[in-house]
């Protein structure tokens, strides 16, 4: 994902805009290894962070990377009760990236309404993910093919690690191996293999239907985009 940093910068720009540049109280939703949290701390050293995920491998890495600079929460976003595990709300911002496409449409719609409930009035939610532009179907296909070729070349040359190879390395690591086995029980391959990738317009409409008073696209990079909703 060559433009990975661009999406994070755009989301954090939006956070800075709604907080006046003050350190935010931020929920890193489906936060994995804490990628968004680490960048938030680099930009807002006094930020109060909560990282929520269910993956035991990724949460172990997040705990190691963030140490005592964030609260780590183990919760399943497929369960409407996930909010009960949050230690600190309401939040100024809720950010997530390349994660919610594992959830079905009806669950994402419900989740957006649940996220609204943990935001303060005026707070912001942003979701960066694979979201093609409906008006460019042919170009989107070409962009996806082009990106696939670039990634495969990077994998072949050793310049980047593929998704399957990364997980194989995690499973072979002494500290992470038990967590990888636990992950297999949580995410059986037959259940954790279906991606749902609607266009950005679907997300914008879902945010409005969930009750966000404003919703729209704040960043686009090829077939990826970041949508945001304002409480």
Image (tube, rainbow, N blue to C red):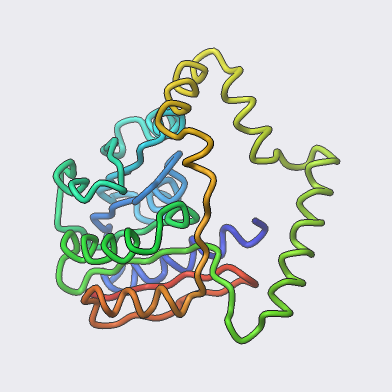
Q: Residue furthest front?
A: 190
User: Where 199 sits versus 185, above or below?
Assistant: below
Q: Which quadrant would the N terminus be assigned to in this image?
A: bottom right
Residue 21: x percent and y percent? 31, 67
**At x 47% / y 46%, what residue is drawn?**
35
Q: Name the quadrant containing residue 231.
A: bottom left
**At x 34% / y 61%, what residue is drawn?**
108
Which residue occupies the foreground of this view, 169 or 192?
192
Residue 223: x percent and y percent? 62, 70
Q: Residue furthest bottom?
A: 135
Left or right: residue 86 versus residue 95 is left
User: Where 181 sits versus 72, above or below?
Assistant: above
**At x 67% / y 80%, what residue is drawn?**
137
Which residue occupies the foreground of this view, 5 or 81?
81
User: Where 189 sits versus 119, above or below?
Assistant: above
Q: Name the quadrant containing residue 116.
A: bottom left
Residue 5: x percent and y percent? 56, 58
Residue 34: x percent and y percent? 42, 42
Left or right: residue 222 versus residue 187 is right
User: Where 99 sits versus 15, above or below?
Assistant: above
Left or right: residue 115 versus residue 202 is left
Which residue occupies the foreground of this view, 21 or 115?
115
């Amino acid at each position: 994902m060559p433009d990975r940093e661009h999406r994070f910068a755009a989301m954090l720009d939006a956070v800075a805009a709604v907080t006046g540049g003050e350190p935010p109280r931020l929920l890193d939703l489906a936060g994995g290894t804490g990628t968004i949290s680490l960048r938030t701390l680099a930009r807002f050293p006094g930020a109060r962070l909560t990282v929520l995920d269910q993956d035991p491998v990724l949460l172990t890495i997040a705990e190691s990377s963030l140490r005592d600079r964030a609260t780590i929460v183990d919760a399943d976003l497929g369960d409407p009760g996930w909010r009960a595990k949050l230690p600190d709300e309401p939040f100024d911002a809720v950010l997530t990236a390349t994660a919610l496409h594992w959830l079905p449409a009806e669950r994402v719609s419900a989740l957006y309404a649940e996220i609204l409930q943990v935001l303060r009035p005026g707070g912001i939610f942003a979701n960066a993910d694979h979201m093609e532009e409906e008006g460019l179907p042919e170009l989107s296909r070409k962009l996806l093919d082009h990106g696939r070729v670039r990634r495969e070349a990077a994998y072949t040359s050793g310049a980047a690690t593929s998704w399957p190879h990364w997980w194989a390395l995690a499973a072979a690591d002494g500290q992470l191996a038990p967590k990888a086995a636990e992950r297999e029980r949580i995410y059986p391959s037959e259940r954790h293999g279906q991606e749902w990738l609607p266009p950005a317009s679907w997300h914008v409409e879902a945010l409005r239907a969930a009750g966000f008073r404003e919703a729209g696209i704040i960043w686009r990079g090829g077939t990826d985009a970041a949508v945001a909703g304002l409480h």
